[in-house]
Image (cartoon, rainbow, N blue to C red):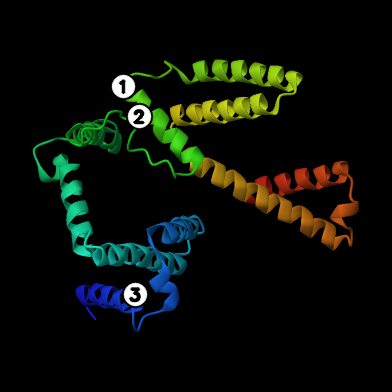
Amino acid sequence: MDNSSAIKNLLALMARLRNPETGCPWDIEQNFKTIAPYTIEEAYEVADAIERNNMDDLKDELGDLLLQVVFHAQMAKEQNLFTFDDIAAHVTTKMIHRHPHVFGEEKATSADDVENRIWDQRKALEKQEAMQESILDDVPQNLPALLRAQKLQKRAASVGFEWAHPDDVLDKMEEEIAEMREALENEKQDEILDELGDLFFVLTNYGRMLGANCEDVLRQSNNKFSRRFKGIESDFKEKSLSLKEATLTEMEASWQDQKRKEKKNKKA
C-alpha cells in the first residue's frame, strides 16, 4: 500500500464510522467539542513517547493523533465547512509563506534567526492581514496554563514589553513573594490564590528569559519526582516497612539516598 492509498483508506474508514445508518453509534454522536479532549490527550501521548525515546510507541501515538485530525476533518466535511485536502493545502501554503529562506530570497543564519526574526515577521504580517486587534488574540485560551503563559510573554516581549535582564525577574519574584506573605497574613483566600498565580507567571517568565521551555522543564521535574518517590516506595518495601507508618524524617532520608544513587549512576 503506498502512502496516498493509506491516507485514502483512513479517510474512507472515518467516513464509514460516521455513516448515520451503518456507522458506529459512538462515533456518530461525537462533535468538535466532545472530540477536542481526545485530541489534546493524543498530543500529550505523542510527547510522552518521545520523552521515553520509544519509537514503536511514537509511531502508534502519531497514528492516533492523525486519526484525530481525520475525525475533525470528516465532521467538518459533513457540515460543508472544509475537507482534509483543505487542511493539507492550507498548512502547505502557510509553511511556504513562513519559510522564505527556503522557498524565497530571504536568508537565515541560524535556527534562532528563523524563530526570532523570520517567523515573527511572517506571523506579524499574517495577524495584520487577519485584522487582529491584539498580538495576543491568536494565543489559544485552552492551552495548558504554563504553556499559554510563556506564549503570552513571548508575544509581549516581541514588541519590547520585556525586562532587560533575567536578574530583573528575580527582583520581581521577590516582590511577588512579599505580596504572597502579606496575603497570607490577611488570611484572604482570593488574594492568596491571586498572588500564587502571579508567582507562577513570573517564574515562567524567568524560565523563558533563560531560554527554557517551561512546559518541558516542569515535565522533567515531574518525572524526576515520580522516579525518586518510586525509589522511596521500593526502599521501604525491601525493608518490609509501610510508608504510611514512616516519619517524614525517615522518608526524607530515603529521598536523599535516591538523589545520591542518581548522581552515582550519572557518573558511571
Name the one closer to the observer, 38 or 236: 38
Determine whether, in the image, residue 249 is placed left or right of residue 216: right
Determine whether, in the image, residue 109 is placed left or right of residue 67: left
Residue at figure coordinates x 88%, y 57% from the top left: 242
Give amino acid for label 2. Arg
> Disc count in the image?
3
**In the image, which is nearer the foreground, mark 3 or mark 2?**
3
Q: Earlier along the polypeptide chain: callout 1 or callout 3?
A: 3
Q: Residues within 10 Å of mark 1 (few under 14, many from 20)?
A: few
The residue singled out by tag 3 in the image is 18
The answer to whether mark 3 and mark 2 are in CB contact below 8 A is no
Give amino acid for label 3. Arg
Name the one closer to the observer, 126 or 110: 126
Determine whether, in the image, residue 88 is placed left or right of residue 153: left
Q: Residues within 10 Å of mark 2 (few under 14, many from 20)?
A: some
Give amino acid for label 1. Val
Residue at figure coordinates x 45%, y 55% from the top left: 40
**In the image, which is nearer the foreground, mark 1 or mark 3?**
3
The residue singled out by tag 1 in the image is 159
Task: Tell me if residue 266 comes above or below residue 112 in the rendering.
Answer: below
Inter-mark Cα distance, 1 to 2: 7 Å
Q: Within the image, what quadrant is residue 72 found in? A: bottom left
The answer to whether mark 1 and mark 2 are in CB contact below 8 A is yes
